Image (cartoon, helix red, strand yellow):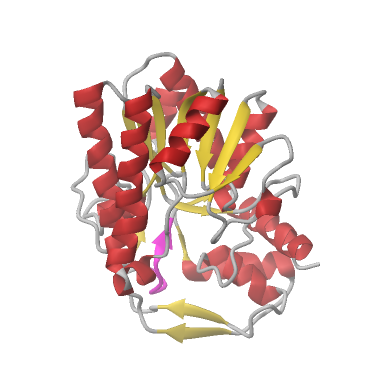
């Protein structure tokens, strides 16, 4: 039996593949390699170049490799880009997820883990935000993920699909052993962009909005180390294998840092005082987003091990130094 990881050649997906292989799992990666990297997939995993929305291909993979569970990372993730291209995001994130879920149900795969997002909350009134908060996305990206959550809940009721939807907050860092990290060109992730600037790969760092209702005027986010995140997925897989109930869970540390605090951490770690320039707000950005994480700790027994901003930055910077060579 094996685990199918869609988007397994990408940033989070490649960390997930390493985590599964270390646990002794057999892993099949399905990635169209548009943003993923073939070199990010370990030789021990089977890599199939293709699309998660290609029903016949997915059916063949499930049959040939005895897939018992699917971990679905494939999709588009840039909030401002989704505002500019909503139809592209609804197609890539929602329509293709529909096809993947439909195929899984048709061939009897019962366990499904979905890569969702805190963007489903929009701009919550209360912090930290809990899983039962109102869902009012500010962007097509958030809506595209919420639509998939709704499909999963409906399919669980109608067809007996077991699922866990993990709502990520801000994922950052890299594998502490340096085996993989974020390779995405022109990435919009704050910590990666700041590390690239510290290493001279960018001329300056832009801060999108410095007039938010926060202590220093910049957005506040809950940053989670990618290694802790994939271990939450592994715990979710164990939860589903135990025939436990479907769940929607936040993935964060319940602690927020502002954009300027993160930039200061990167400057400390790198020893470089790189240029920082103000820029206009981006559409779809909430002022503050911090996770309530008590539910995931209680349900999955998840205990983060890297919940320190300086540790996250250090691992991200080390990867960026290695990746740049």
Check the picture and name the quadrant holding the C terminus. Answer: bottom right
Toward the right, the furthest residue is 325
Q: Residue 97, image x and y in percent?
A: 35, 45
As drawn, 171 above or below 44: below
**Is residue 225 in view from this perspective?**
no
Q: Residue 38, image x and y in percent?
A: 66, 53
Q: Nearer the viewer, residue 295 or 320?
A: 320
Q: Residue 5, image x and y in percent?
A: 52, 38
Check the picture and name the quadrant holding the N terminus. Answer: top right
Q: Main secondary structure of the magenta part?
A: loop
The residue that appears at 64% across and 58% down in the rendered structure is 313
In this rendering, position of residue 303 left or right of residue 177: left
The residue that appears at 72% across and 58% down in the rendered structure is 319
**Is residue 71 in view from this perspective?**
yes
In this rendering, position of residue 314 left or right of residue 192: right
The residue that appears at 64% across and 80% down in the rendered structure is 202
In this rendering, position of residue 71 left or right of residue 92: right
The residue that appears at 53% across and 53% down in the rendered structure is 32
Residue 316 is drawn in which quadrant?
A: bottom right
Toward the top, the furthest residue is 242
As drawn, 125 above or below 240: below
Residue 292 is drawn in which quadrant?
A: top left
- Give the total of numbered labels: 0
Q: Residue 150, image x and y in percent?
A: 22, 40
User: Is residue 219 found inside the magenta-colored segment of the image?
Assistant: yes
Q: Nearer the viewer, residue 211 or 57?
A: 57
Magenta extent: 215-221
């Amino acid at each position: 039996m094996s685990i199918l990881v869609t988007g397994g050649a990408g940033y989070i997906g490649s960390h997930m593949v390493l985590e599964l292989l270390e646990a002794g799992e057999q892993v099949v990666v399905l990635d169209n390699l548009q943003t993923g990297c073939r070199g990010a997939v370990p030789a021990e995993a089977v890599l199939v170049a293709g699309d998660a929305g290609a029903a016949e291909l997915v059916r063949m993979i499930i049959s040939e490799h005895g897939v018992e569970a699917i971990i679905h990372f494939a999709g588009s993730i840039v909030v401002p880009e989704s505002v500019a291209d909503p139809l592209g995001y609804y197609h890539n994130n929602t329509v293709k997820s529909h096809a993947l879920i439909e195929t899984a149900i048709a061939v009897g795969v019962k366990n499904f883990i979905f890569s969702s997002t805190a963007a489903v909350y929009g701009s919550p009134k209360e912090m930290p935000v809990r899983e039962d908060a109102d869902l009012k996305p500010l962007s097509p990206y958030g809506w595209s993920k919420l639509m998939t959550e709704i499909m999963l809940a409906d399919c669980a009721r109608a067809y007996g699909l077991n699922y866990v939807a993990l709502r990520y907050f801000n994922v950052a860092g890299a594998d502490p052993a340096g085996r993989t990290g974020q390779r995405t060109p022109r990435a919009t992730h704050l910590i990666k962009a700041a590390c690239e600037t510290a290493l001279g790969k960018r001329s300056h760092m832009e801060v999108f909005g410095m007039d938010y209702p926060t202590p220093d005027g910049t957005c506040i986010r809950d940053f989670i180390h990618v290694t802790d995140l994939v271990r939450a997925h592994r715990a979710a897989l164990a939860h589903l294998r135990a025939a436990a109930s479907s769940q929607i869970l936040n993935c964060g540390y319940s602690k927020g840092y502002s954009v300027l605090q993160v930039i200061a951490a990167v400057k400390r770690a790198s020893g470089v005082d790189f240029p920082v320039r103000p820029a206009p707000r981006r559409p779809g950005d909430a002022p503050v987003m911090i996770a309530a994480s008590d539910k995931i700790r209680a349900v999955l027994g998840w205990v983060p091990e890297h919940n320190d901003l300086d540790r996250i930055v250090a691992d991200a910077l080390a990867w960026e130094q290695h990746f740049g060579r």
